[in-house]
Image (cartoon, grey):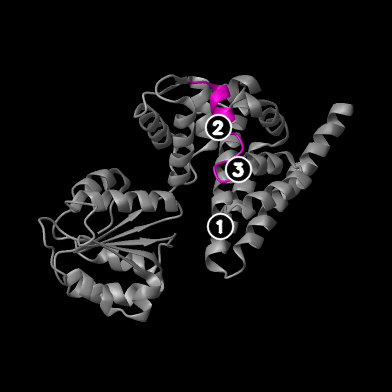
Amino acid sequence: MKIAPRQVDEFINRPKAEIAAVLIYGPDQGLVRERAEQLVKSIVSDINDPFLITALTGSSLRQDAAVLIDNAAALSFSQGRRAIRVRDVTDTHTKIFAAFLEEPKGDSLVIVEAGELAARSSLRKTFEQADNAAALACYADDDRRLHQVITETLQSHGITVSREAMDYLLSQLGADRMVTRNELDKLALYMEEGGTVTLEDAQLCIGDSAAASMDGIIYAVGSGDQAALDVSLRRVMAEGAQPVQILRALARHLQRLQLAASYVQAGQPPEQAMKALRPPVIFLFENQFRFQLSIWPVRRLADAIDVILEAELNCKTTGMPAEHVCARALMRIAQGARVMAQHRSQRVRA
C-alpha cells in the first residue's frame, strides 16, 4: 500500500500487525533515517536489546538473500515484534523483497531504507501493490512542516524564536531533516536552556552551512553572476549537496520570485510584493531579491522553472553525470539573467 503524507505519522506510530515490510525512500535521507528510527521505536519493546533489532545492508543481501528470511523468522525472546533495518537498497533488490512478501516468515517488521525512487521504480511498485507492505516517501519539508519542526525542537529545550529569527531559519533549513535537527541542536546548545532566539543568534549559529543553505547559488543564478555561481556551486558540491537538491532549491526560489513578480504585474509595489511572500524575504537578501524582481518578467521565470524540471528529469533518466546536468542548467539560467540585467542597465542609462 501507498502511505499518503497525511497518514504517515499515524502509520509510523501504530503500524498494523499484518504489515511485514515498509519501504521508506526519498531525497531527504535525514528524514528517511528519522522515520525508520521512529518506526523501530513503535514496535520494539526495548531499543537497547540487540536481540530485537537487526541491521542489514543492500550489499549483504546481494551476497546472501537468505539472510533476510533467516532474520525475519528469528523468534523474539521478549514481548513485541523484532525490527530488521535494511539500508542502501535499490531496484536491484526488488526480486529479493518480492519473494519475501509472497511468503513472509515470522512476525518481524522489515524496514527498508532507500534513496530517491522514480514513480516507475520496481521496488516502489512492489511495496505499493502488496497488501502486506507499505511505501512512504520522504521529501524536503515544506514551510509549514519546517516551521513545526523548528518550533517543536526548540520548545523541547524551553527556547522560543523571534519572528525575524524564524524567517531566517525557514530560509536556511529544510533540505535534509537530519541537517535541520543538527543545526537546531547546535542553536539550542548555544542558547542554553530557555531564552528567545534572535535574528543575530540564528545568523551566528547557522549562517554559513552550505549543506543547509543554497543562498549563494540561488542568488548568483537569479542575478546572473556566473563567477559567483561557479564558486558557490563548487563549494556546495564539495560539501555533499546532491544535484537534485540544488535544482529544487533554485526552483523554490524562482517560484517565490514568480509569485512576487505576479503581484507586481497586478499593480503592487515591489516592497509590498516581497512582504506578501510567506515566509517573507529576510532583510539580508532584500536588495538581491528586489534586483531580481526588476529584471525577471513572469514569463521568463516560467521558462527558467521548466529548464530546472527538465534538468531534474535528465538527472534521473539519461545516465548523464547529474553534476554536469545540474551545472549546465544553472549556467544557462544565469546567462539569461545576465542578459536581462544588461538590458535593464541600458534602459536605466537611456
Q: Residue at x 12, y 56 (%)?
A: 80
Left or right: 320 in relation to 292? left
Q: Residue at x 58, y 39 (%)?
A: 253
**Residue holding disc 3:** 214
- Residue 198: within the magenta? yes
Q: Residue at x 80, y 33 (%)?
A: 344
> What is the three-letter code of the residue carrying label 1?
Glu
Mark 2 or mark 3: name the one nearer the start of the chain: 2
Rate crowding at label 1 as few (under 14), some (14 to 19) or many (20 or more) other CA atoms within 10 Å: many
> In which image quadrant can residue 291 be found?
top right
Mark whose residue sits in front, 3 or 1? 3
**Is residue 210 visible from the viewing direction of this image?**
yes
- How far is the residue under mark 2 from the one under mark 1? 31 Å
What's the mark number on residue 312?
1
Q: Nearer the viewer, residue 113 or 181?
A: 181
* Region in magenta: 197-213
Under tag 3, what secondary structure? loop
What's the mark number on residue 205?
2
